[in-house]
Amino acid sequence: MRIATFTFRSIPLRPGCAGADKFALELYPRLVARGHQVVAYNRLFKGEAPIGDEYRGVVTKNFYTPTRKKGFDSILHSFKVCWDIIVHDTADVVHLQNGGNSPFALLLRLFGKKVFLSQDGVDWKRAKWPWYGRLYLRVTQYLTAYAPHAVIFDNVFCKSEFEKRFNKRYDFIPFGSEVPEDSLDESILDELGLERGGYFLFVGRFIPDKGLQYLVPAFERLQTSKKLVLVGGAPNPSDFERRITGTRDKRIVLPGYVYGSRTHALMRNAYAYVQPSDIEGLSPVILENMGLGTPIICSDIPENRYVVADTGAYFRKSDPDDLLRVLQWALANAEALAENGQRGKARARAMFSWDAVAEAFERVFADSAGARHRAPPAAASAPQARERAPHASGLAPSPVRPTGSTKAAAPETVAEHADANQR
């Protein structure tokens, strides 16, 4: 197949990249390895240097966007890319991410392209968007439901919501969790003055959705000599980012954007990884930390509970006081916390594989007429995890409290995953 893809920032990764870019970095080279041609369109801003024209077999094309205004930069980039795909016939199959790009799915279909869209959450609920952005995303959900040949969700709860609303069947394909552990660049520990097991970690964008407005004040009240490392930043300068980076707590380390083996070294050596999100899809950062055996502390939103199940410690969403309580529990129960990390690693390896993800996308792309009506083999809902997680209806069980004594059920395999979704 000849495949084109856009609506992420860039591959390879550069400052400002996030989960969509990590997803692209893992998926598209694997599709090339399976014999397909892939063209990836990078979005650059004025003053940024081009990133080359090839990455692990993926042809990369760098298009500049004249504005950094949130939302408009992506729309302008998408128009330019669609023109290139249509005029120069660079692909037969086009893969987009996020429902805000669904109008371009309709445009590309009019010119005979097979179009597939990945949706990772309920975008219009994300606080990072201004009011007009949320309105646009709410309106375009209807195009998301019908314009592409198929819609692929990494979030079983969002998938269920769309299926009920639009009376259609969609695909579910999760992210992978593998991280190469034999090439971690641990020099970053010395550069940042960190000790193994001597810090809590967060990796992500500094935007309200990610919950740093709860984590920073909770940690500032925590009595500990351990540090808090906040890796990342805001894709565009913001008052929110300035408030977070303006902390006076000298234990909080702000290294900016860190990628690849250096990020994985920070994950592997953290005392625990903290994900305080208000909204998530299926978090690739949580999966990578789980894959490395790093204990997880996270908000009790359904998306987090689906991935982590009973291998993590939860606090009430948007509640810095409860987050402080769980951080205190983690410090007082190091053995139980570490045990959670090892059970999380076993769960991640059993359930989430990037190679299986690539195979699943290949099957969906190859069978646009039928794939969206059944689950591809590498993906599915996880019955055991779904029982432990809140249901899509929003009727959530009581938050899981960290006790360190609960044993995880044996994680279901990918095959069991798929069999359950096909029943």
Image: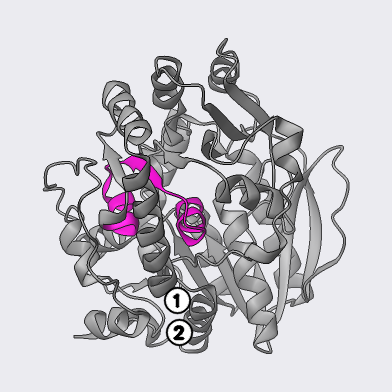
141 lies left or right of 61: left
Residue that protrudes farthest toward the front in the picture? 335
Residue annotated with mark 2: 368
Q: Are marks 2 and 1 in contact (CB under 8 Å)?
A: yes
| Label ID, residue 149 | 1
| Label ID, residue 96 | none
Q: Quadrant of the N terminus?
A: bottom right
The one nearer the camera, 135 or 423, is 423
Q: Position of residue 107 (x, y in %)?
A: 56, 65
Q: Position of residue 32 (x, y in %)?
A: 69, 81
Where residue 298 sits, quadrant-wise, is: top left
| Mark 1 nearby-residue class (10 Å; few <14, some 14–19, many ≥20) | many
210 lies left or right of 48: left
Q: Quadrant of the C terminus?
A: bottom left
**Does the stretch in magenta take in 376?**
no
Which SS does the magenta portion mostly show?
helix
**Does the stretch in magenta take in 286?**
yes
Q: Amino acid at mark 2?
A: Ser
Q: At 28% from the left edge and 34% from the top edge, which residue is drawn?
A: 317
Mark 2–mark 1 distance (CA, rounded to whole Å) = 6 Å
In terms of sequence position, does the residue under pointer 2 or pointer 1 come before the other?
Answer: 1
Q: At 52% from the left edge and 88% from the top edge, which residue is drawn?
A: 366
Magenta-colored span: 285-309
The one nearer the camera, 190 or 418, is 190
Q: Position of residue 215 (x, y in %)?
A: 42, 26
Where residue 192 sits, quadrant-wise, is: top right
Where residue 355 sits, quadrant-wise, is: bottom right
